[in-house]
Image (spheres, rainbow, N blue to C red):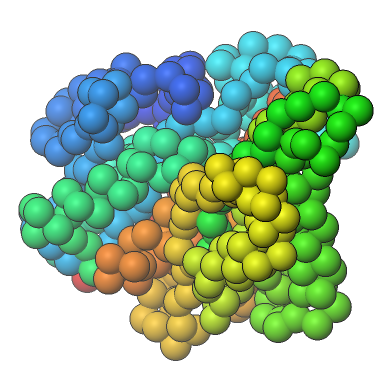
Amino acid sequence: MSAIPVPPRLTTVEMLARLVAFDTTSRNSNLELIAFVRAYLAELGLDARVSTDATGRKANLHVIVGPHGPGGVALSGHVDTVPVEGQAWTGDPFTLRHVEGRHVESRLVGRGATDMKGFVAASLAAIPYFLARGLRRPIHLFITFDEEIDMAGARRLVGDLAESGLRPEMCIVGEPSMMQPILAHKGRLALRVIARGKPGHSSQPGRGVNAIQAAGEALAWIAADARRRTAEGPFADGFDPPHTTVHVGTIAGGSILNIIPERCEFTMEWRTIPGDDFFAEADRLRAHVTATIEPAMRAVDPECGFTFEEMNWIPGMSLAASHPLTGMVQQLTGSNTTGRVSYGTEGGLFEQAGIPCIVCGPGDIAQAHQPDEWIAASQLDACDTFLRRLADRLAT
């Protein structure tokens, strides 16, 4: 096959430098980055669909290359990043740096380089090739917001796809996987638990209700349940760890030592293997608290007790090894193996909406969220090759 002429455009590394320069930490607006991408696409003759959150400060972008309509393959990536405060960066996190060394592979350092502006940059840089190739089936590009918080962007996009009728047949989520096909990830439920006590002087504990100690009883049950799962399962091969996990991440309560604490709050999460239901796990915790902890609290004051607030949740993702998407991505990457991961992705939401998904993207998840976050230049090269092979496939 003769070489496909490609108009001179930004390389993947040049595009990544542009994207990293936008501080799209999740607390910030991403509109400047979206405007840049939209202008880039317009230069290529493409009209992107943009939708915003309720505040108008965050936006998704959806563009179709090739035949304009449903079907084809989506490439999905988020552009929000985690904060850099409190991390020991050796340079400006929002200026892409190229690091070389005799015993170190060529690296590109910058916030979001791995998670996951690298994949988005490769996808954008590949669009001139997609156009020149003459696709017979469309390639969709999804760029979303707030993946690092509650995946509100992907939830909005799912609704947009249903409304527009422009749903792809399948989706590749480019989270960092070292360009290896990932068929499944765990589901996740984040919960805020609030214990409400009754204040009083610490010299007379019986006249009050200690919210911290009540929360501690709940925490003891959670810790015991975590140990049970580690020892007894159930287990699912391929995940690390191979069982559902439960984790408490933050806790706060009390004011000074000689006052019975009126309030204690902690946040926690379940990460569930396929077959386990995180809502059912939350119900188990509620039932334990209701039966064994709250009666003594309410005997002192009926207003005391616990409140449970769902912060956010992500469904798990599970693609069959026999699915055509699995075989296609294996062929495009040259990989004979597939994997499962414990972190969550937007793929679970797309799959729930009826779009089969696989995770495959450049970079190592171990570098995500770290100071001096980096992606190997060789991983971007591998992603470039993968995307061109995808276009070749969809052109025949």
Which quadrant does the N terminus fall into? bottom left
Q: How many marks?
A: 0
Q: Name which residue lies at 46% across and 57% down.
A: 314
Of residue 213 and residue 150, the one placed in the foreground of this image is 213
Residue 313 shown left or right of residue 390 in the figure: right
Which quadrant does the C terminus fall into? bottom left
Residue 94 shown left or right of residue 12 in the figure: right
- The answer to whether residue 180 is visible is no
**How far across and how far down the image is residue 308, in percent?**
53, 50
**How far across and how far down the image is residue 124, in percent?**
34, 38
Residue 120 shown left or right of residue 236 in the figure: left
Asked where in the image residue 45 lies, by quadrant, the reply is: top left
Of residue 34 and residue 149, the one placed in the foreground of this image is 149
Of residue 33 and residue 194, the one placed in the foreground of this image is 194
- The answer to whether residue 152 is visible is yes
Residue 59 vertical position relative to residue 157 in the rendered view, above or below:
above
Q: Name which residue lies at 54% across and 81% down.
A: 275
Residue 54 vertical position relative to residue 122 in the rendered view, above or below:
above
Residue 278 vertical position relative to residue 140 in the rendered view, above or below:
below
Residue 42 shown left or right of residue 316 in the figure: left
Q: Residue furthest bottom?
A: 322
**How far across and how far down the image is residue 81, in percent?**
52, 31
**How far across and how far down the image is residue 130, in percent?**
26, 49
Residue 74 vertical position relative to residue 340 in the rendered view, above or below:
above
